[in-house]
Amino acid sequence: MAGIDVANGRGKRRAVDSEINMVPMIDFLMVTISFLLLTAVWTHTARLDGTTRVPGPPDPINKPIEPMLRMHVQVPPGDAPLALSLRRGNELLEARTVSRRELSARLDDMRRAHAPDFASEESRVVVMHADNQIPYRDMIAVMDSISKDARFRVNLATK
């Protein structure tokens, strides 16, 4: 145990020496540290990364010379058809409206029609534009149909 030696008691006064039990404080610190470590890990397990630089390059310093070809899916609230577009930067190359059931097939048709542009892995990213009014289950259903058979990855862009 730890003790503090202040001075020897002389004369009629009693001794000022006292012992402080450090075990409870050490136990409390260990419990606090373990709690902080566990909660720090839990905050990163179920995290969805988002960025405002969609469909920009991953690194703002190394910008590509020519913008990549990207497919965009606009998801309106309700049962309205989806707006599917093919863009190179801000230039619109092709636009279609498709139902939610045929989205995966139409994305694959667009990929085959522009096969040389979709050769790299980075060009196989589909940007999904979702409104705040869309229910979570509908948004996930569209994301699942986009990434069906691991042909495309999804970047989520919200308003």
Image (spheres, rainbow, N blue to C red):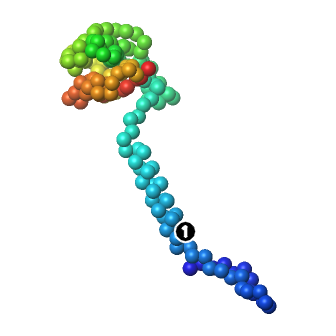
The single residue placed furthest to the front in the displayed view is: 12
Report the amino acid beneath label 1. Answer: Met
Residue 158: x percent and y percent?
A: 41, 23
Residue 128: x percent and y percent?
A: 35, 21
Is residue 111 placed above or below 5 in the rendered structure?
A: above
Q: Is residue 31 visible?
A: yes
**Rendered image quadrant of residue 64:** top left
**Rendered image quadrant of residue 94:** top left
Residue 32: x percent and y percent?
A: 49, 59
Residue pictured at 41% horizontal, 44% vertical: 44
Dot 1: what SS? helix
Residue pictured at 29% horizontal, 27% vertical: 137
Is residue 50 placed above or below 159 in the rendered structure?
A: below
Residue pictured at 35% horizontal, 21% vertical: 134
Give the quarter of the figure containing the C terminus. top left
Q: Which residue is mark 1?
A: 25
Q: Is residue 89 left or right of residue 71?
A: right
Residue pictured at 27% horizontal, 9% vertical: 97
Q: Is residue 3 left or right of residue 64?
A: right
